[in-house]
Image: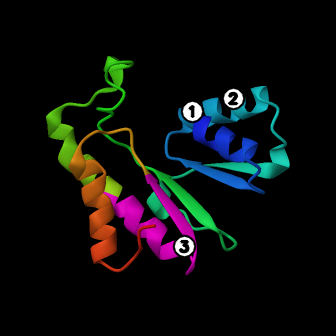
Amino acid sequence: PGGKTSQLLSAGFEHVTAIEANSRRCHRLKKNLDRLRFDKDKYDVVVKEGQKWSPKTTVDGILVDVPCSATGTGSRRPDVLRRESDISELLDIQELLANHCAEILPAGGIMVYATCSLLKEESEDQVKKLVEKGLVETL
């Protein structure tokens, strides 16, 4: 955990807030950021479900790294693949997270929707729903 957070910090983003629902993953994320010697004033790690989090100040952008079926990482990590029965619950969570992030993002803000799934319903279809609702525009 922390790869995307590390990349954002390395790219020079002024401040990064990482939201993670799983406390163990949060602990590992903090350890990884410490190991990489990032300035602790440049990031926050919050243990909370993303759809229940709201920023204390305005944010310029949000990277929504949704939980997914991991079909795009299956050849490297078959242990993370989910069964078909899990997909409908994942789709609901993905949509909830994406909608929440679109709603808290100010006009002109940038949202990146990220998933490691190869399934259309977890990627393009979710973004299409956001566009159809008028919550986002694509670049």
In the image, residue 119 above or below residue 91: above
Amino acid type, callout 2 = Asn
Name which residue lies at 77% across and 26% down. 35
Q: Give the percent coordinates (x, y) of residue 128.
A: 28, 65
Kindly identify which residue carries mark 3: 105
Q: Position of residue 8 (x, y in %)?
A: 67, 47
Q: Residues within 10 Å of mark 3 (few under 14, many from 20)?
A: many
**Circle 3: element type:** loop
Residue furthest left in the image? 85
- Residue sitting at x 84%, y 50%: 41
Dot 2 alpha-carbon crowd within 10 angstroms: few under 14, some 14 to 19, many 20 or more: some
Question: Residue placed at 82% from the left, 44% from the top?
Answer: 40
Q: Are marks 1 and 3 in contact (CB under 8 Å)?
A: no
The x and y percentages for residue 106 are 57, 78
Provide the residue designation for mark 2.
Answer: 32
Distance CA(mark 1)–CA(mark 3):
24 Å
Q: Is residue 119 left or right of residue 117?
A: left
Does dot 2 land on a helix, a strand or a loop? Answer: helix
Earlier-in-chain disc, 2 versus 3: 2
In the image, is 118 to the left or to the right of 31?
left
Q: Which numbered tag is attached to residue 99?
A: none
Q: Is residue 101 above or below residue 89?
A: below
Quarter of the image where one finds residue 87: top left
Amino acid, disc 3 = Leu
Mark 2 or mark 1: name the one nearer the start of the chain.
Answer: 1
Residue 94 seen in the current view: yes
Pick whichever, 12 or 79, lies toward us.
12
Give, as a single range, the part of the protein colored magenta: 95-113
| 2 and 1 marks in contact (CB < 8 Å) | yes
Residue 1: mark: 1
Of badges 2 and 3, the one in the foreground is: 3
Q: Is residue 100 magenta?
A: yes
